[in-house]
Image (cartoon, rainbow, N blue to C red):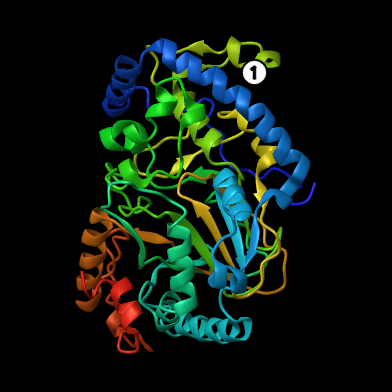
Amino acid sequence: MPGQLHKWPAWPEYSTDNATSQDQDFINTKKTIIEEFGQENLQKAWIRVCTDLSSVTDEIVKRGNEIIPVCFSDQILENGFLPDDQERIKKTGCVIVRGALPQAEVQTLYAEVHQYIADNRNTISAWPSETPSMYEIYDSPVQNTIRSHPRHLKLQKLLNALWHDESGETSSDPLVYYDGVRDRPPKQVFLGLGPHIDAGSLSRWAAPTYRKVYEAVFSGHPETHDAWNLEVRKDAVQDLFKAPSHSSVFRAFQGWTALTSSRAREGSILLYPNVAATIGYMLLRPFFNPPEDEADIMDASKWTFDENGCVFPGTKKDESQFLSRSSHPHLRLEECMMHVPDIQPGDTVWWHSDLCHAVDPEHEGTENASVVFIAAVPTTPMTKVYIKQQLADTLAGLQPSDTQGKVNERLLKGYRGHEHLSEEARRAFGYYL
């Protein structure tokens, strides 16, 4: 099937992870949710979401990565997302936008950032330490050129507009959130980011406002959960437990802007092309224990409500939310994690902040696979506070607080600052907040 993994990688399994069972934050969180919503509603939601997943996963397996929407930037930037595209994006939680930036321009930019990394390699940090490919640079000339490109900013605005908020306190005007660069050499195995969901882990259950985002799920009506409602989400605390892996800023879409080509087994990215049922299942999973007979695993009615135990599979307070085949069997991850279609320089990949995704563990190509991480961030009261501070830190030579980095990038060879930013870009960078 196009896009499927040909062999399941050695990603960790979480079915027997009991590390959370004695942690008071986990114990209190589970107790609070059971008291607030009740066993009956949680069981009702569990059966419903597992039933929905049966048809969801069948469709993903049948269609392969053709289920991932692919749009073309010239059409989008001229006319916006068509209604059919909007429907597919909202169902899957992801989209590929081809040609967001001109390919020849991006190829030149890749050569520049590759040299910038080489020139400053003894100063900047990267991970994994043994095989570095994720570079902790945030304010380089190439990153800022791409972030501030008028085509890219307009695309971010259109993506933000797929969310809705009746409060009048937010807008789709994009703000620039600093993230890093990946430049991954061929033949480099990478198992560090298996199937996971960003934007917090235990915070989704433990932070009261964040939990309210998923009230329909916990109340027994997961089918009514609106994954695109920003009205409550804009105030949710994603990083209740501070850690470098947790963004404090709401990203309507996380994003890759490709600097080089990539494809399946060549440093690509895998997405689970469904957002609502997947997040509902993940949220309900800690409240149920699997049946003893493995033959009954896929029968949700034979799972038992777990009132006293306190295992949150794949959940660590200082990490993203991880999933695995054994801990989240109804997701059928082995069949449903899909490589995105082949990517060319200048293409972009976007995924909802609740979407399960993974970095391709293999890179069997012949050239580096490189991307700049640029998200679509709407203007909200909370994002404005962070972006304003991010700019102040940057101008003072400090790396963004979310990253906890210690490098003064203003001292790096080739650093240029913000003198070339347009007025539109300066707004997005936070100069007028």
Q: Residue at x 48, y 14 (%)?
A: 43
Q: Residue at x 39, y 79 (%)?
A: 140
Q: How many marks?
A: 1
Q: Is residue 244 above or below residue 122?
A: above
Quarter where residue 63 is shown: top right
Amino acid type, callout 1: Ile
Q: Is residue 432 above or below residue 317?
A: below
Q: Position of residue 318 (x, y in %)?
A: 35, 43
The answer to whether residue 301 of the structure is visible from this angle is yes
Few, some or many C-alpha atoms within 10 Å of disc 1 (few <14, some 14-19, many ≥20)? some
Q: Residue at x 38, y 51 (%)?
A: 245
Q: Is residue 305 above or below residue 15?
A: above
Residue at which label 1 appears: 297
Q: Position of residue 28 (x, y in %)?
A: 27, 22
Q: Is residue 10 above or below residue 299?
A: below
Q: Residue at x 49, y 81 (%)?
A: 113
- On the rendered structure, is 280 left or right of 264? left
Quarter where residue 60 is shown: top right
- On the rendered structure, is 80 left or right of 391? right
Please, which residue is most extreme toward the right here? Answer: 1
The answer to whether residue 4 of the structure is visible from this angle is no
Quadrant placement of the C terminus? bottom left
Q: Secondary structure at mark 1?
A: loop
Q: Position of residue 131 (x, y in %)?
A: 54, 64
Closer to the camera, 126 or 270? 270
Q: Position of residue 179 (x, y in %)?
A: 40, 65
Closer to the camera, 283 or 324? 283
Closer to the camera, 229 or 419? 229
